[in-house]
Image (cartoon, helix red, strand yellow):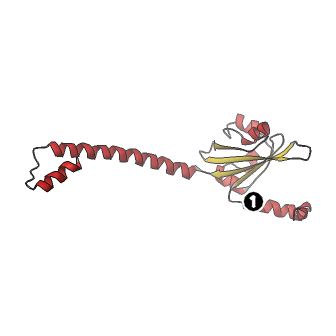
Amino acid sequence: MLENFKNVGNLKMLEAIIQTSYDGIYITDGQANTILINNSYERITGLKKEQIIGRNMLELIKEGIISRSVSLMVLKSRKSVTLQQKFNTGKNALVTGTPFFAEDGTIQLVVTNVRDITELQALKEQYEESKTENIKYQSIIEELNKQIATSDFIIAEDEEMLNLILLES
């Protein structure tokens, strides 16, 4: 099957597959020059191909377009790297770069998968806020129960009811 990708028609099919991936795909050469990004990368990051294609990762960092480069980390470590990245558009993504080695052992390409986690982070923040509010309300309820238990305003003639009120506190 891989032999079939050697002709131009099948290379176009491979590029079409890359373009239809739901996750963003970002490909750099062995010198960290951007050679391809797919449509999902544009959707996830808010960055356009015109801003990126042909540009070196060091330039993109220097200009503040990206916060850091997984491609540069992969080129340095020579192994896969995963990190969280924030883009100047406010989007957050989980980014995994993987080296593609040539036969001589040099890194020919770095293929990076980009997954949008902006919504996930917003949900996590909402969850943490809800948790904090829940603790606050729990504390208020406990304090009110203590006040009720020690209050002279509650009259309970039934011993079971009195025990129930005292248990709640």
> For residue 139, which quarter of the picture?
top left
Query: In the image, what residue type sits under mark 1?
Result: Gln
How far across and down, in percent of the image, does residue 165 sit? 18, 51
Number of numbered discs present? 1
- 70 or 102, which is in the foreground? 102
> In the figure, is residue 146 to the left or right of 107?
left
> In the figure, is residue 4 to the left or right of 143?
right
Seen at 75% across and 42% down, the residue is: 71
Is label 1 in a helix, a strand or a loop? helix
- 98 or 86, which is in the foreground? 98
How far across and down, in percent of the image, does residue 106 sit? 87, 42
- State the residue position of label 1: 19
> In the figure, is residue 107 to the left or right of 167?
right
**From this viewpoint, which residue is outermost toward the top?**
62
Seen at 55% across and 52% down, the residue is: 119
> For residue 3, which quarter of the picture?
bottom right
How far across and down, in percent of the image, does residue 49 sit? 74, 50
How far across and down, in percent of the image, does residue 73 sit? 74, 38
Seen at 71% across and 34% down, the residue is: 62
Q: Is the residue 20 above or below the residue 149 in the image?
A: below
- 155 or 133, which is in the foreground? 155
Confirm whether residue 86 shows in the render: no
